[in-house]
Amino acid sequence: MKINVKLIGLFRTGRFKQEDRQYPNGPKVRDIIDVLQLPQQHFGIVLVNGVHAGTDTVLSEGDHLVLLPIVDGG
Amino acid sequence: MKFQTTDPAANPSAIFYKCCTVDLRNGEMKFADVPCRNLEDVLGGFGRSFQDLAKRKIENAYCDQNPLIVNTGLLTGSSAMTGMRTYFSGYSPIKGSKVGLPAAMWSAGSGKFGAKFKWTGLDELVFENRSEQPIYVVIKETETGPQVELKSAEHLLGLSTHEKIMALQEKYDNAHFAAIGRAGENWQNNYMGAVALSTENQLKSKEDKFRFAGRGGMGSLMGYKNILALVAQSSDKISKVSEAVKKVNINVIKGGGSARIQPLSRGGGGGTWAAYEVLQEFHAVPVNNFRPQGNAIPEKLFRENVEKEYDIKSESCFRCGITCHNNISEKNADGSKGEFLAKFDYEPLNLLSTNIGIHDAGQAARLIQLGDNYGMDAISLGVTISYALSYNERHPEAPILNGATFGDYEKIRELVIQTGEGELPEIGRGSMRLSESLDETSYAYHVKGLEIAAYQPETNPGYVWAIAGGHISMGTYGLLTREGKSDLESWVKGITEDKLHIVGFDMIGLCKFFDITKGIGTQMVVDCLKSEFDLEVSAEDIRAAVRRAFLRGLALELRQGYSKAEFSLPAEVSENPNRNIKLPNITSPEFFEKLQKRVWEIFEPELEDQ
Ligand code: SF4
């Protein structure tokens, strides 16, 4: 199935900004993070179709997934 | 500090801090080993200074009875990572209630001054009254204990923060420096003076790479007292790092807590600047006086765009492995590093660039550098200017000041210079006073008289209960964006339980990046205190002390005349909701009313004990 994946900030380095990607049916957000090998210690925010979600969220055909690193200002 | 107990929670009076009180009117000094009243006194920073400020009824920040308290935290100068903090406390010229009373305030900064100060043997320096002549103060280590000397500072008058530090470095070796700039010297018209703290990097490179205790006008209070600089002269006291502290330090670096702040080259997140990219996804990067437009304009200051034209180097304070400074320099034609410009931390960068309509990295860096050298708080300066620009946008027929508008670099630069020179009290006295004088207060982005940090208030109703500025004294700024919490329960819990603990870092002498999510009531801090001072204290006792200190700050605000109505966000947030921000609305009048009710129900009974 097709998921539109957008990466933010340092997650883009050596990967991509945004693209449609094919995954086996019903992947969890965690599966996609694993495939992309995103660094665990930076992992912060998941948005599915613009709404905060967790890494256990199961994705559906055509979902828009945004993966963001954690943020801290100062 | 002197320790005659290993149990600071049960027996605080057996722990003594070395305090020197200086009467600036006659030069008299009193040294004392003061027994601690409670664990807050032992931990230090504002936990101690606010107890002393609470004893005084101050009606005007610029009066003889308002002290300037300079102190450190228990772990300042220790081998615990980030133990570099110095604190400046007093009643603030800029933050105040509507009845005209000044609020108690502290401001914290890193650099190496704090460690040097601690290594002189002194824990606290209290300045009473004011000096008739400009002076600087030398705190030095001697065989018989710390000594304090007052020296004429006529020769420093009119110099920038960096020039003062450079001039003093010529005269004092083995020393670090805290200096005000011209803004602090012009305290009558500038209430946002900051204190610059020297770094090793600055003294070696001679470049203006300092850290700041910026918030609340502590540099202006220092200027009122006619103190232009402090010199802390001592040998470095670097003991062998114990196995326990080594483990903690490794955990700070590798454990994940500070990873996002570390350099990209080391697999880190690239410092606080990286917040730009994350917040932009929600269209929550402040633009043109906190009105994000739902477009891509903030992207111009993304790191990937800046590094094409400028050299970016990650640097750090003395011995800190977190290395959070992103120092921006010009790039020469051959690609090598050119002239140093400024550091790009999220707050000063946003508030002196995107939020005033400046989208050019070089112009932003020049404005930050200018503000730093005048010694002004970048947050109060940027937000007060953005208010003025917004006023001019709304009143093109009758603009104020020089008529500057968003993005007009030359005119904005002129405003910064005039403010630093004390020629523009309209900006120098902050956005609350300016907006009240113009009778247009709804879009002045301050809370309780102190300008807010670079997080949209729509994302952070917790600003309202921050006791010393939004992002340093209430850690709720990521609760909606980062954690996705938009329900009332999470916000009540965040404000009244978890997120207030961020203030603990401003007691103990550590940067919040030591362990930003958990605060200081942790096994890591327990282990450091055991290893460094043989103190046995539980994480619960530390958390209880931090909570008491926070509540004392809140009680002090109420005592200084703040009404409940002043615990509110800028009115524009609810009067004209910004539909461009892609996050749930948690600042509607209905939500906020419920939040206020619940938060005060929890805090109020505890405030009675303060
Ligand atoms: S975290 Fe940053 S500001 Fe704090 S001591 Fe380390 S380098 Fe300095």
Image (cartoon, helix red, strand yellow):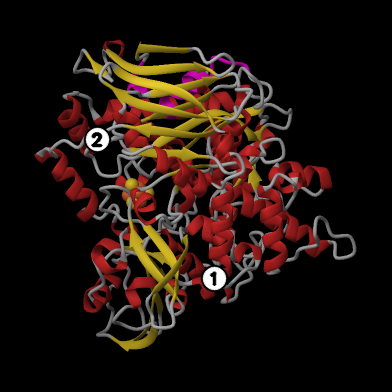
Chain to which mark 1 belongs: B
- Point out the tag, 2 or 1, that comes first from the N-terminus: 2
Q: Is residue A42 above or below residue B306?
A: above
Q: Is residue B390 above or below residue B77?
A: below
Q: Residues within 10 Å of mark 2 (few under 14, many from 20)?
A: many
Q: Write down the residue under mark 2.
A: B78
Residue B494 on the magenta span: no
* Three-letter code, disc 2: Ser
Provide the major secondary structure of the magenta segment: helix
Q: Quadrant of residue B241?
A: top left
Relative side of B119 to B535, left or right: right
Image location of residue B36, percent across then percent down:
35, 15
Q: CA distance from mark 2 to mark 1?
A: 37 Å
Q: Furthest-left residue in view?
A: B243
The reply to the same-chain question for discs 2 and 1 is yes
Badge 1 marks a residue whose secondary structure is: helix
Which mark, residue B362? 1
Image location of residue B38, percent across then percent down:
35, 17
Badge 2 marks a residue whose secondary structure is: loop
**Residue occupying image coordinates x 73% and y 28%:** B100
Chain to which mark 2 belongs: B
Q: Furthest-right residue in view?
A: B397
**Residue occupying image coordinates x 26% and y 73%:** A33
Q: Is residue B286 above or below residue B564?
A: below
Relative side of A56 to B581, left or right: left
> B85 and B603: which one is in front?
B85
> B392 and B501: which one is in front?
B392
The magenta-colored residue range is B38-57
Relative side of B569 to B538, left or right: right
* Three-letter code, disc 1: Gly
